Image (cartoon, rainbow, N blue to C red):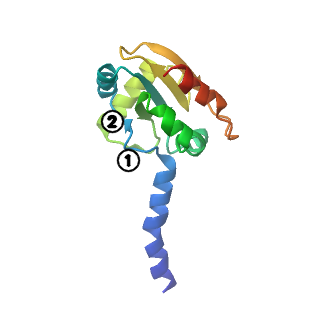
Amino acid sequence: MKYFVFFLMIPLLASAQADFNTVDDSKWLTNYDTAISKAKKQHKNVLVYFTGSDWCPPCKMLKTDLFDTSEFQELSSNYILLYIDVPRNRDLLTEKQMTHNKELLTKLNKKKVFPLLKVIDDKGKELDQLSGYSMNGVIDSHIKLLEKNK
């Protein structure tokens, strides 16, 4: 009986882990060209988020400390959001998506810093960026970046 209960818990635990590692998929785009196109139509800047969702502890904490806050939800409406994940587990993305993300990594994140928030305009010009996260719950610089470039 205890094994039966354990097997019933596996999907619950797996979904909790998956949710912890990703941002809200409904708002974040994963294609650069789509993001630029929407930015042009809506006259907004693009907020690009580089993460290593399955291996980067600061990226995981940033989700909770920044992306899950109402303050971020409000400020993010001023941006087109672009999520660029570079996981170590190749099963998390399609080969096409991984290739796309690695191309953007070379183009927009040459130092391969994670996490990285980068603001670009609707022509792809880099306007501002903030790299790293100290995992102490202090997100003032992240909020300032969002307020400054909206």
Query: Foreground residue, 114 or 148?
Result: 148
Q: Marks 2/1: CA distance?
A: 11 Å
Q: What residue does disc 1 label?
A: 91
Where on the picture, by quarter, is residue 38?
A: top left
Residue at the location (36% across, 13% down)? Answer: 123
Residue reaching furthest to the right: 136
Residue 4, percent from left and from top: 45, 81
Residue reaching furthest to the bottom: 1
Q: Which mark is residue 97?
A: 2
Residue at the location (53% across, 37% down)? Answer: 72
Name the side, left or right, on which 149 lies relative to 91: right
Residue 31, percent from left and from top: 32, 30
- Of helix, strand and loop, which one carries label 2? helix
Q: How busy is the neighbourhood of tag 2: few (under 14 within 10 Å), some, or many (20 plus)?
A: some
Query: Foreground residue, 92 or 140?
Result: 140
Amino acid type at circle 2 is Gln
- Of helix, strand and loop, which one carries label 1? helix
Name the side, left or right, on which 56 lies relative to 85: right
Q: How busy is the neighbourhood of tag 1: few (under 14 within 10 Å), some, or many (20 plus)?
A: few
Residue at the location (30% across, 24% down)? Answer: 33
Residue at the location (56% across, 20% down)? Answer: 148
Query: Foreground residue, 144 or 12?
Result: 144
Q: Which mark is residue 11?
A: none
Q: Say which of marks 2 and 1 sits in front.
A: 2
